[in-house]
Amino acid sequence: MYFSSTGKGGLRVDSRPTFPPLPMSRLVRPLLSFALLWVSQTVWSAPAQKQSPNFLVLLADDMGFSDAACYGGEIATPNLDQLAKEGVRFTQAYNTARCWPTRASLLTGFYAQHIRRDALPGIPEGGGVKGVRPEWARLLPNLLKTAGYRSYHSGKWHVDGSPMEGGFDHSYALMDQDRYFTPKNHQLDQQKLPQPEKGFYATTAIAEHAIDFLKEHAAQSPKVPFFAYVAFTSPHFPLQAPQEDIQRYKGRYEEGSDVLREARLKRLWERGMLHHAELSDPTPPAQPWTKLSTEEKAAFCTRMEVHAAMIDRMDQEIGRILQQIKEMGASENTVVVFLSDNGASAESLVRGDGNAAGASPGSAQSFLCLEGQGANLANTPLRFSKKFVHEGGIATPLIVRWPAGIKAKGELREQPVHVVDLAPTVLKLANVSWPKMAGETPVPAADGVELAAVLRENKNLANRGLWWCHEEHCAFRLGDWKWVATKGKPGELYYLKADRAETRDLAAANFERLQEMEAQWTKMANRFKQESRPAAIPSPSAEVR
């Protein structure tokens, strides 16, 4: 037998003729010794495999497309701005228009309707906020365990099942979204914590627990990669923030919504983040600034001051989490992702402990919503808001930084991408294969696509259909065309490359295209119905492989 090096750190065995051994002369012995040493070094000195990246996913709640300074806003977000400077920003990234469907899509790679986490029109079994995922729709932490990852959750949950069942090793779950200062339900590793009395603020607490988990990870599992999912509740209603943060924005919004929207759009244009976009008309219930009463103008300013303070505080806490990762020596190989679960909210309601008469705006005794005028500014220049699938409801800021893997600094990515792309991308970067089976049930292909080449090389994506449905508001995007139908109204058609703000409905002149896109939406909806039916659920003991 004849042994030789493969050139890749291994030995190859070949069948060769054998010959009588030759006497070893003084010349042969050193040569053979050198050869054996070379083979040994070739076999055992192969380059070490690159360490799997860590992941930090930062999710805001009800944050508008242009709220952050690096997306044109006037709110101070230096930490997000630094991430954008050191990474890439997407200009056409999308969520699902609502909090719980986005979370399901983010953590699974499937549209929420595909896994019974949001309803399909006329299909009662389609699911919704109380829908239960099929067993094959596992969450990212469960899938990452096969590669040795430890996973941590801090913040809002709003996914079926519990974080620990979903594969997280530790979880701080803030289950009360109606109280920032005195939540009645928050849990650490699924054990209920007492209601805090003083010195508590939800955004800070979410960051504190995320930092605690990372400190423990550094102490106990320093060589193990981590997946940290930090789901802030800010700036979701009620608008509540520390008074010192609110004070920084006093008087900032007295110029009025019209002037501020124009300023945001101008900054977006100057930074190349929007092409051929103009301001949409104020979406009801928003109105032009000049038509508001003095009281309505004052109310807008107050709400925006608190909204801005909540985002400012979230940015401060993001800075502390990033500092912890830096102190762990993990910044270089941590993929940091920031996005929002839906557009800013135009809702107006009172929940929780109510809105006490005379309460300071933003305090624990107040319950304010951003409402239409503020949402219209936060989503500049786009139409509509949370719950709707026009651009204002589904467009999200998306920032990705990974120094070890993305050499681009401060670049833009204009490819249309969706929150369903996050899970396939994380698995690709972690070198984890998409599961094929759950017990005896085949696992469907992900609805999302992996974006590794988009992140690294700005690679173009092939035209694929992006799909939306929420509360019977439906949309489908193919290339630069978008079909959108508000519940109970005829479909509209927009050419987003020339009209991102959806100001010119082209349906009448392109009726065949409109029908074709609607048919493609229906085809995908029917597939989701078929694949998510209860008969497709394997037994609870089935393992995903």
Image (cartoon, rainbow, N blue to C red):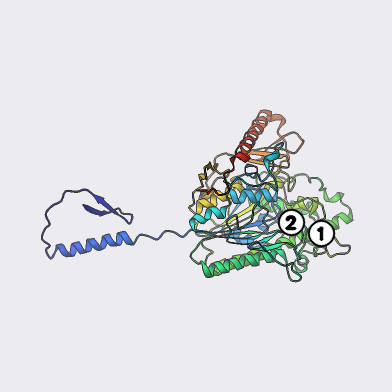
Q: Is residue 524 left or right of residue 435?
A: right
Where is residue 473? Give x, y as percent: 72, 40
Where is residue 508? Give x, y as percent: 72, 30
Marks 1 and 2 sit apart, C-alpha to C-alpha, by 11 Å
- Look at mark 1 in the image and give the residue it sits on: 367
* Mark 2 surroundings within 10 Å by alpha-carbon count, few (fewer than 14), some (14 through 19), many (20 or more): many
Q: Is residue 466 above or below residue 320?
A: above
Whether residue 504 is visible, yes or no, is yes
Res. 88 image quadrant = bottom right
Q: Nearer the viewer, residue 533 or 427?
A: 533
Name the residue: 63% across, 49% down: 104
Q: Is residue 524 above or below residue 42?
A: above
* Mark 1 surroundings within 10 Å by alpha-carbon count, few (fewer than 14), some (14 through 19), many (20 or more): many
Where is residue 371? Give x, y as percent: 80, 52
Name the residue: 73% across, 61% down: 185
Amino acid bearing label 2: His
Q: Nearer the viewer, residue 194 or 383?
A: 194
Where is residue 369? Give x, y as percent: 80, 55
Q: Is residue 46 above or below residue 284?
A: below
- Look at mark 2 in the image and give the residue it sits on: 236
